[in-house]
Image (tube, rainbow, N blue to C red):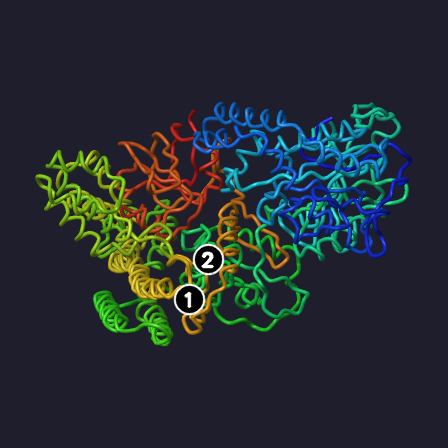
Amino acid sequence: MRDKRFDEGCETAGRPGAAGERGGPGHHEGSSVSGPYVLGLGEVDEDRAGLVGGKGAHLGALSRVDGVRVPEGFCVTTDAFRRVVARAPEVDALLDRLAGADPDDRQAVRALSAEVRRAVEEAGIPDGLAAEITGAVARFGEGAAYAVRSSATAEDLPTASFAGQQDTYLNVVGPAAVLRHVSRCWASLFTERAVIYRRRNGIDDRTVRMAVVVQRMVLPDASGVLFTADPVTGHRRTATVDAGFGLGEALVSGLVNPDVFTVRDGEVVARTIAVKQRAVHALPGGGTREVTVEPQRQERPALTDVQVVELVRLGRRIEAHFGCPQDIEWCLTDDGFRIVQSRPITTLFPVPVPEDTDGRTPSVYVSVGHQQMMTDAMKPLGWSMWQRTAMVPMHEAGGRLFVDVTPQLASPASRAALLDVMGKGDPLVRDALETVLERHEFDRPVPDAGPVGPLAGGAPAASVTEADPASVAELVERSETSLAALERDIRTKSGPELFDFLAEAFEEHKRVLSDPVSIRAIMAGMEATWWLNDKLGEWLGEKNAADALTLSAPGNITSEMGLDLLDVADAIRPHPEVVAFLNDVQDDDFLDALVELPGGAGAREAIEAYLGRYGMRCVGEIDITRPRWSERPATLVPLILDNVRNFGPGAAERRFEQGRERALRTEQDVLARLRALPDGERKAGETKRMIDQVRAFAGYREYPKYGIVCRYFRYKQALLEEAERLVRDGVIAEREDVFHLTFQELEDVVRSRRADDRLIARRREAFRSYGALAPPRVLTSDGEAVTGSYRRDDVPEGALAGLAVSTGSVEGRARVILDLADAELAEGDILVTRFTDPSWSPLFLGAAGLVTEVGGLMTHGAVIAREYGLPAVVGVDQATRLIRDGQRIRVHGTDGYVEILD
């Protein structure tokens, strides 16, 4: 009788379509059912969700859409729920206990939620409320059958559907049965699954109220679900229809497999017809039962193609009304479709707002986060600041940034260069772009788009770029001079003057980034690396030969950051009381207390010196709103303690020197082997020149990012001071509110001294929801997330394919770490994580190997892994899900795959 997801008022005890239905202009209920606690569906819409819940509000809105037919009925409001819960005072105490329960303790959550449900059901329904509900039932027919459906205020939200989390009861016959099932719906607000779902979505149990929808049932010939966008790929012009015979309960429960139809541009383009041996039908006296489908019907489609196209056309109308793709539950009788629910599809990744296009060629976007090794959602101030200071136009979607590569992809003149650049950065991006090209949507001639921009470091050169090694020191000095000028001048700016200054500062920011000498230095190191890998592979059969040759390359600010933290550990290790104190650190004000301990003054001095050089860094540092190490110094404590435990004194200098010596031995071996080849002296000479070039410039590859982050920290400090003034003036409630405004919006607030609190609240909620979405590497303007693959036949069965970025093979315990603050590595552990930006580099020193879901040959994690001699494989799709924490794995950093050993 209970259907946990398909909340269909999909069946009636009378003839199909005999009961009154509503939908579109002119469809109204025969009589009003309004009372203090009951509202007819015709009296509610989206604006009354707080009173009738998400489902009730959507059904009321659906009934106003032209051509949409909704089974008639009424809502028992959330005021009725509050009145009933007030009769059970023990609920408050139980909710306190539930709030304090460990969310991972499923047994405790299960037991407490059961107690709450029991208390709600036993509270009973007051006579006056019961009379109002049964009166509404009488007006629709006491002998009729009804669907009694939960409708919580946290339900069918744009960011969380809550599908199936509360209960629905089908084919409920008679006023007494309706009352009983209304009470059960109220209690189902506290099912174990609903409580856990709310926890995962950050929703407090006390803030949610339950309404109940009571609808006349409709006997369906077929029923199912329509997605107005492809729920797997996200393609917005592709709809999918799941269909089966009888009630939809058979599909939801897994009793049968559905027929599946795919519709694009008004045409069925694919269909899979299942063998449907069973169906669920209503019983005359109430409830449902499974029945056997007649053998001759089992392989027949539940819908004809004409009906499928008609249904999708109806779905497009509903989608247009609500303004986003919909998950629609439907029933079919002999006189047409009934819509019994429509909710947003909450799993789709948003689509960037496209530039003006010809409408024939879809726009194709490449993820910036995958290039920057930071795929988390960014707050509006964060992504808008990155847009302002980036060298190419970027588009926001889902709190992430994307670059439109359509012009380069469409132009044959620039296409090869784009694919080459993307392939060197991330082969999965290249494969996804090639997948798009295979669809022939770019066959139409277009003007030359010009050279590939600096999204992934610039266009590949036909020959290796040459640069003067002395330019590196000059570039660093010029960057430091520019930063010092920024620090000096920004201190005196506030209010509108600050934003006038920042407009100029951003131009200087971009000038530093686009310095031709700097770009030449970066490309000199990258191209020398590619040359060595290509040529030594060809001449000596060596894979990724440059890896060992770049060990301990000088001047790499990111690898120095890791080594310098070893020196901090050296200042702390000799002092047991300091170590014990740091083991108990919880707050960020611990530095002041250090000086009271023996050796504490020196420890504090070492930490502060480290923060002085690297305190502007943090996880996700391209988002200006992220807390920096200098703002949250306790973040570093676990890393320092790992170094204290896992290393001895002088480890930094020793490790660097060992790497340098290994690189030198590798160089001597390579050159000797080359000289033994035909034309060996020439090959050895060219190789020596490339080795010198890669060691001269490889370290500088990391410096421009360091300079960006330094500048960002100065911008942030100035903007937060401005935010504090806004708080003092009562313009905003708290300082971090400005993080949910774009840079332009913040400037407008500062100039006008007015802020939109509702906009900030909406942005905060949107940011929370974006965190649950995984950004695609490649996204089209049709909303399709295009997934690339490695297309390799050299990976052992069961192994996880990825990109080899640092040679060597290592076996050890996998430590799956999603948050740097939770990091704890023992000797021999292999770090497995989603991505690693520069802030993760100190953790590399204690790891035996590295596996990431995101990354490319020249991304930060790969560069530092090579510098430290760490076997590494990146771009391993879903590595943090497929590899369990504690499993033994083997990382093949030379061949690019990971084996799970147990």
- Residue 425 location in percent, x, y? 43, 54
Q: Give yes or no for contact between labels 1 and 2 (Cβ–Cβ under 8 Å).
A: yes
Q: Quadrant of residue 500?
A: bottom left
Most foreground residue, 266 or 493: 493
Q: Does 770 sit left or right of 322 as displayed?
A: left
> Of the residues shown, which amino acid type is indicated by label 1?
Ala
- Residue 671 location in percent, x, y? 25, 50
- Residue 85 location in percent, x, y? 59, 33
Most foreground residue, 804 or 608: 608
Asked whether residue 250 is in view, the answer is yes
Q: Does 217 sit left or right of 358 as displayed?
A: right
What label does residue 368 carry, if any? 2
Q: Earlier in the sequence, mark 1 or mark 2?
A: 2
Q: Is residue 458 above or below residue 349?
A: below
Q: Determine crowd level at label 1: few under 14, some 14-19, many 20+ residues with C-alpha closer than 10 A.
A: some
Return the residue found at the far left.
Answer: 598
Q: Is residue 187 above or below residue 509?
A: above
- Residue 416 location in percent, x, y? 52, 62
Most foreground residue, 693 or 763: 763
